[in-house]
Amino acid sequence: MLAFRLMASLLIGLLLGAALTPRGLGAQRREPPAASSGQPPVSMTCPMHPDVVESVPGSCPICKMNLIPVRLESIWTCPVHSVVHESGAGACPICRRPLIQMTVALTWTCADHPEIDQIDRGTCPDGKRMIAKRTLRPHGNHNPQHGGQFFMAPDNTHHLEGAYPRARVFRLYLYDDYARPLPSDRIKRVKARVVTKETFDPGTRATTEVAAFPLAMARGATYLEARVDDSSLPAQMTAKVRFKDDSPEYRFDFTFSALSKEPVLPSTPASTTVNGKPSRPARSPAASTGSTSEATAAPIAPGSSAPSPADTGAPTADPAQVSLPIPDTTEGILAQLNSSSEQIRDLVQRGDFGGVWVAAFQARDLAIALEGRLGQLGPVHREAAEPAIKRLVRTAWLLDAFGDVGNRQQIVDAYSIFASAVAELASAFAPRP
């Protein structure tokens, strides 16, 4: 609820033109920190909002808490058997389900002194080298588990996945903040419905439901389901969910371009590690080249993981911090900025909210690069460009946050501010005789 109120307050402030100072605006473009040998680079994260990951110290854009250092890496693990830790995509050696990618925090400890837990590798009191300790992070796994669309709830403690497995059937799978399925007793406390038709009054910003269907838990099921009216594809559906009686109702907008398909188990034996990358940028650091086998790994528990052998490869940085090259010219920066804006617009129109963050953060870096060129402008155009840069950087963060929670109207509102800032920058930096 706190995260939801803070994000809403940020958006209201933007809509009213509040003069907030965004974090991360500096004359120089930020680069990812270099990785030390055998370790991922140190990133900065919010202790309350682990989705916030930066390459430099600062404050959280949501709650303003000071960021703290963390080393993040990706592993590939089985959705059912957490004992499996691999460095690349493949199949679970136990049940042969496709492995999923998730983010963990890497620290160092000692077998004989488990109380030791530090961010840099060192030497244990007995002279032995420290061993790696991997700990699950809240929101470290945003992978759909049933072929649907996956969102984080604004309360910061739940996730859910909407699926459209066959015509006229909508299913809602519920998870905790570690993407573990909720137990049946907690699912039974959830009150939810799915809306297939509604109207929105832009003047009053009020929504009127035209067709809504209650979501219920079927006997023996681990999900909520509703029979809905027949919809042609792409189908838009909205789940309105209250996780318990005293919690607010949250809205999640799903767009299904096709029927949802459960992951298919491989029909032939597969290697547990396959070189390759996810089909789209993962919301996590890139995998390192080291591997931890089932024989030596222990299940990773939230907040307390068993040690595993240290990786030997040089990890790469979080792709959220690895930006496209910044063009050398102002014209090139503006062209790339406009391209990023068009990508975001297309993603929002398609309902692919989970993909918005990549283009939004690329645009953020482009805006920061333009800040270093403000001196090229005259006083009038500089006065217009400077606040436009600030608005663009702030709305890049909002697009990322609202994309995670899947509320279409919030995303549309944030993108409207974002696109306006892009247009103002294009005007301010336009060549003049």
Image (cartoon, grey):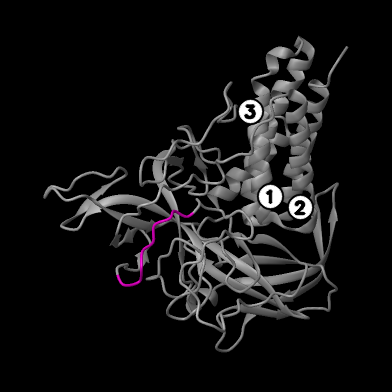
| Location of mark 2 (residue) | 348
Residue 346, how many percent across, how many down? 79, 51
* Distance from Cα at disc 1 to Cα at disc 3: 19 Å
Classed neighbour count for the residue bearing mark 1: other residues with Cα under 10 Å, few (<14), some (14–19), many (≥20): many
Please name the amino acid that badge 3 sits on: Ile
Asked whether 290 falls inside the magenta stretch, the response is yes
Q: Do residues under tags 1 and 3 come within 8 Å of each other at their CB atoms? A: no
Task: Give whichever of 372, 162 is nearer the camera.
Answer: 372
Classed neighbour count for the residue bearing mark 3: other residues with Cα under 10 Å, few (<14), some (14–19), many (≥20): many
In the current view of this chain or complex, which residue is farthest to the right? 433
Residue 199, how many percent across, how many down? 85, 60
Counting residues from the start of the chain, the first of labels 2 and 1 encountered is 2
What span is in magenta?
Answer: 287-295
Q: Secondary structure at mark 1?
A: helix
| Location of mark 3 (residue) | 368
Please name the amino acid that badge 2 sits on: Val
The prevailing secondary structure element of the residues shown in magenta is: loop
Counting residues from the start of the chain, the first of labels 2 and 3 encountered is 2
| Location of mark 1 (residue) | 356
Q: Secondary structure at mark 2?
A: helix
* Distance from Cα at disc 2 to Cα at disc 1: 7 Å
The vertical placement of 10 against 240, above or below, is above
Q: Do residues under tags 2 and 1 come within 8 Å of each other at their CB atoms? A: yes
Residue 306, how many percent across, how many down? 29, 62
Task: Give left or right: position of 361 versus 232.
Answer: left
The vertical placement of 322 against 58, above or below, is below
* Distance from Cα at disc 2 to Cα at disc 3: 24 Å
- Residue at 50% across / 52% down in the picture? 286
